[in-house]
Every structure is written in structure tokens, then in C-alpha cells.
């Protein structure tokens, strides 16, 4: 029986959560253009905190969405960097 937390599954999870992060930035940008009900900012931060930082940052700059809000410009990269350090710490210490 395969271990749930295998490297393969972890990598697959990070690929999927980052694709989700990228696309929620796209969806929110489209909703903003059309004046429709938006994805809550809290949700964008939750996806980032769940490991989707690369995707949300890529989406933010690809779609030029939330780039004027300092909370996002600093918050998304900060969360992502802290997660990378946590993984490195957990792996090597």
C-alpha cells in the first residue's frame, strides 16, 4: 500500500494547489472587470497559505490583479517564503 504522504503525492498536491491559486486570481480579475460578486480576499490568502503561493503570485502579475494592494504584494510572497523555510527546517532539522 502506498504511503499517503509520499513525495509523489506531495508534489502532486503542490501542483494542483498552485494551479487553483493561479486560476482563482484569473476568475477574481474577470469578476472585477464585470462588476460581479468577487472571491473574498480571505479565500485568496487561504489558498496561498495552503501552499498555492507560487500560483497566486503568478496569477497576480499575469493578470495584473491586486498588484496595487500592499497586503497582497507583500503578503503573498511573505507567506510563500515562510512556507519554504518551514519545509526546509522540517526536512533538515
Image: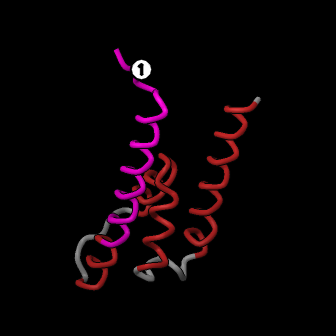
Q: From this view, report whether residue 44 is shown above or below residue 13.
A: below
Give the residue furthest to the top. 1
Q: Quadrant of the C terminus?
A: top right
| Residue 73 found in image quarter | bottom right
Magenta residues?
A: 1-26
Q: From this view, report whether residue 78 is shown above or below residue 27.
A: above
Give the residue furthest to the right. 93
From the viewer's perspective, is 6 left or right of 72?
left
The location of residue 8, given as percent across then percent down, is 43, 35
- In magenta stretch: residue 25: yes
The location of residue 51, given as percent across then percent down, is 50, 48
- In magenta stretch: residue 69: no
Q: From this view, report whether residue 77 is shown above or below residue 9.
A: below
Q: Quadrant of the N terminus?
A: top left
For mark 1, what is the residue?
A: 3
Residue at the image position 34 percent from the left and 57 percent from the top = 20
| Residue 92 found in image quarter | top right
From the viewer's perspective, is 92 left or right of 69?
right
Amino acid at each position: 500500500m502506498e504511503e499517503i504522504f509520499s513525495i509523489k503525492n506531495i508534489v502532486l498536491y503542490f501542483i494542483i494547489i498552485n494551479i487553483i491559486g493561479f486560476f482563482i486570481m484569473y476568475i477574481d480579475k474577470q469578476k472585477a472587470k464585470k462588476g460581479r460578486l468577487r472571491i473574498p480576499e480571505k479565500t485568496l490568502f487561504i489558498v496561498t497559505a495552503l501552499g498555492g503561493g507560487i500560483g497566486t503570485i503568478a496569477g497576480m502579475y499575469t493578470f495584473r490583479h491586486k498588484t496595487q494592494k500592499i497586503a497582497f504584494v507583500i503578503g503573498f510572497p511573505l507567506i510563500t517564503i515562510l512556507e519554504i523555510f518551514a519545509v526546509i527546517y522540517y526536512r533538515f532539522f
